[in-house]
Image: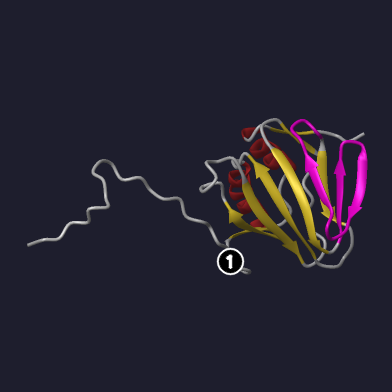
Amino acid sequence: MAQHDSSRTSGPSVATPQANIVLPGEGRVIELGSLRMTVKESGGRTRGTLALVEFSAAGAFHSPPPHIHREHEEGFYVLDGELELTAGVETIRAKPGTFVMVPIGVAHTFGNATSEPVRFLATLSPDHYVHYFEEIAPLFAAGAPDPKAVAAIMARYATEVVSLG
């Protein structure tokens, strides 16, 4: 005779959420020339509300053109090295422990402030801008990407190239 678990109720089963644990060195890597991006959370476990990526570079890297996001916020948290970040009219040399939140509509860009290694986290809220990086990565295979091609891809993600100041 089969035994039945009397503690279970009948009806549709409900999936139990699981924590997403990403250990050091883990995550999906996207190469952007000399800048390496490791996706720690793609947004798949946050209902699309947040993505978290880690950027690292051994030295200088191709900085994005100054731009404005129209559909997502972006945050930067420096782990190692110094990140030069321009947001609005302010430019800072962000050292480890510095956090900068860039709301929708604020022009910004970033680059390595020195020739030393730099490592920083970026939040993307909502998560869709991860796909921008997936699309732009092949442009780096041939060296510095064409600015017009970069701007066209940015436009597909509600991002506009602008001048600062």
List x then y, in percent, for residue 110.
82, 49
Q: How crowded is mark 1: few (under 14 residues within 10 Å), some or many (20 or more)?
A: few
Please identify the residue farthest to the front as the structure is shown.
6
- Residue 66 visible (yes or no): yes
Q: Which of 12 and 44 is in front in this view?
A: 12
Q: Is residue 61 above or below residue 58?
A: above
Task: Label 1: state its secondary structure.
Answer: loop
Residue 106 occupies quadrant: top right
Q: Which residue is painted at 81% across and 67% down in the image?
A: 117
- Magenta-drawn stretch contains 100: yes
Q: In this view, does 165 lie to the left or right of 152?
A: right
| Residue 57 picture location, percent across and down | 76, 63
Quadrant occupied by the C terminus:
top right
Q: Which colour scheme is used?
A: secondary structure
39 on left or right of 5: right
Q: For mark 1, what is the residue?
A: 26
**Can you tell which quarter of the image residue 101 is in?**
top right
Q: Is residue 34 visible?
A: no
Instruction: Say left or right for 18 vs 111.
Output: left
Residue 65: x percent and y percent? 79, 43
Q: How many numbered marks have been drawn onto this rendered protein structure?
A: 1
The verdict on residue 107 being magenta is no
Q: Which amino acid does label 1 sit on?
A: Glu
Which of the 4 image quarters holds residue 22? bottom right
Give above or below for 77 relative to 14. below
13 w.r.t. 105: above or below = below
Which residue is more in the foreground, 123 or 162? Answer: 123
Residue at 83% x, 53% y is 111
Q: Residue furthest left?
A: 1
Task: Please name the residue shown 66% across and 36% down the image.
Answer: 152
Which stretch appears magenta? 82-106
Towards the viewer: 144 or 63: 63
